Amino acid sequence: MEIPTNLKHKPVIISDNYENIDGRNAYDSDAKGLTLGLAQWNDRGKVDISAKVWRHTGEKWSRQSEEMPLHRVLDLAILVCRAKQYFSQAYRYPKFYDPENPKIDRIGLQGDAMNVKVCVENDRIDGDIALFYQALSNDDELIGERLQTLARILKELGYMG
């Protein structure tokens, strides 16, 4: 199935078989491709690169396809890595977090910082965090493989010693 090139997002670099490697949904995923391309929100004279997940319902391209600026993709990767790091030690807390101190980290970016914390505003956080912890554990091999690949590529790019 070919990723559309006639829409506002203009693909430049693609993974057109993402459905085959989409985690637990591999070979049965509606996410058919990933692209890096020219963002759909570009104004005349201003060009941004975005990443897009292309979803297909089986009959048509889905409105649930998602497009994100590259920095947001990387911010999500940072958040995933920090969460994985946090949950490797979360067993120390009876509820997998400290209700009195839900802050996990504050990561400096762009002269400010990204707050990383447990969402204690969620009225079901005790159950939800346990489910999250279990799901993260269940997907450890899938996530670990991708993090190893990311680490190798970052090293090749000179970002790691």
Image (spheres, rainbow, N blue to C red):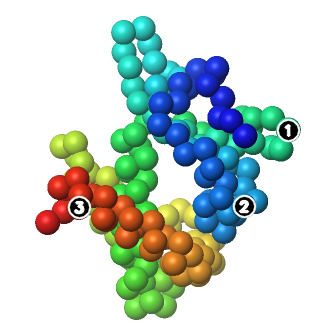
Q: Circle 1 sits on which residue?
A: 59
CA distance for labels 1 and 3: 41 Å
Considering only vertical position in the picture, is 47 above or below 81? above
CA distance for labels 3 and 2: 30 Å
Closer mark to the observer between disc 1 and disc 2: 2
Q: Is residue 158 left or right of residue 5?
A: left
**Comes first in the chain, label 3 or label 2:** 2
CA distance for labels 1 and 2: 17 Å
Residue 61 image position (x, y, % from top left): 75, 35
Q: Nearer the viewer, residue 88 or 11?
A: 11
Q: Circle 3 sits on which residue?
A: 155
**Comes first in the chain, label 1 or label 3:** 1
* Residue at the extreme left of the image, as rendered: 161
Q: Residue at 68%, 63% (x, y): give it.
A: 26
How packed mark 2 is, by other alpha carbons closer than 10 Å (few <14, some 14-19, many 20 or more), is some
* Callout 2 amino acid: Tyr
Considering only vertical position in the picture, is 159 above or below 120? above
Q: Which mark is residue 27?
A: 2
Q: Which mark is residue 113?
A: none
Q: Secondary structure at mark 1?
A: loop
